[in-house]
Each structure stands twice: as C-alpha cells, then as structure tokens.
Image: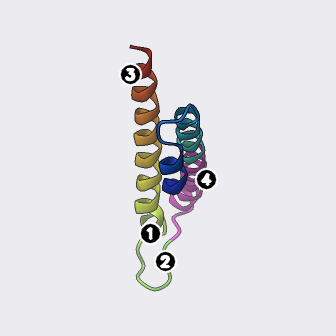
Amino acid sequence: MRLELLEDYLKGKKLAGPVAALQGFLMMSFSGAVAFYLFGIMRQQVLSGQITTTSNTPAWVSPLGFFIGMVLLTFFVLRDLVSKSFLNRC
C-alpha cells in the first residue's frame, strides 16, 4: 500500500518526512473508513440474525477477519505516525 519507489527517491530530501506522513495518514483514513463501514454491516447482520445459505453460519463471521485486519492496520499506522512525530521533536 505504500509507494516504496517514491520513498526511495525522496530518501534524504526535505520532502521525505511529509510524504511519508501523508502516506500514513491516507492509509489510516482508508483503513479506518473500511473498518467503520464493515462494523455497520456486521452490526446489521448480528441484529437481524442473518446466516449464510451454504453453511448456516452467522453472516458476520465471514467479514470479521477483514474487519480485525483493518482495525489493526489503522492502529499500527497511527502508532507509527505518533512515534515518528515524537521522535522528530526530541
């Protein structure tokens, strides 16, 4: 999801930090938005008691892994953005 070619080109230049921050912010925003909408979908599936037609499992089980991945990605990117901003200030 990151533009490694752009990062390699900008290494050591003044724009490297802001571009990396912009990439992190965009990745965090996208992952957070996907997690938010997935939560709404799964909530409706839980409330309605919807099950899959093929295996009769609850319908919310299928998107659960993707939801967990998006939440973790959001938190990891946020952690990286915060740690890098604090390290640059010190």
Amino acid found under the numbered disc labelled 1: Ser
Please give the residue where the numbered disc 2 appears in the rendered image.
52
Q: Is residue 12 above or below residue 72?
A: above
Q: Is there a contact, CB below 8 Å, between mark 1 and mark 2?
A: yes
- Which of label 2 and label 3 is nearer to you? 3
Tell me how far mark 3 sits from mark 4, CA to CA: 33 Å
Where is residue 62? Give x, y as percent. Answer: 44, 69
Tell me how far mark 2 sits from mark 4, CA to CA: 20 Å
- Residue 14 is left or right of residue 62, and the answer is right
- Residue 23 is left or right of residue 58, and the answer is right
Please give the residue where the numbered disc 3 appears in the rendered image.
87
Amino acid found under the numbered disc labelled 4: Tyr
Q: Is there a contact, CB below 8 Å, between mark 3 and mark 4?
A: no
Please give the residue where the numbered disc 1 appears in the rendered image.
62
Q: Is residue 88 above or below residue 5?
A: above
Give the magenta range: 29-50
* Secondary structure at numbered mark 3: helix
Circle nearer the N terminus (2, 3): 2
Which residue is more in the foreground, 51 or 82? 82
Neighbourhood count class around disc 4 (C-alpha, 10 Å): few under 14, some 14–19, many 20 upward: few
Please give the residue where the numbered disc 4 appears in the rendered image.
37
Circle nearer the N terminus (1, 2): 2
Q: Is residue 17 above or below residue 26?
A: above
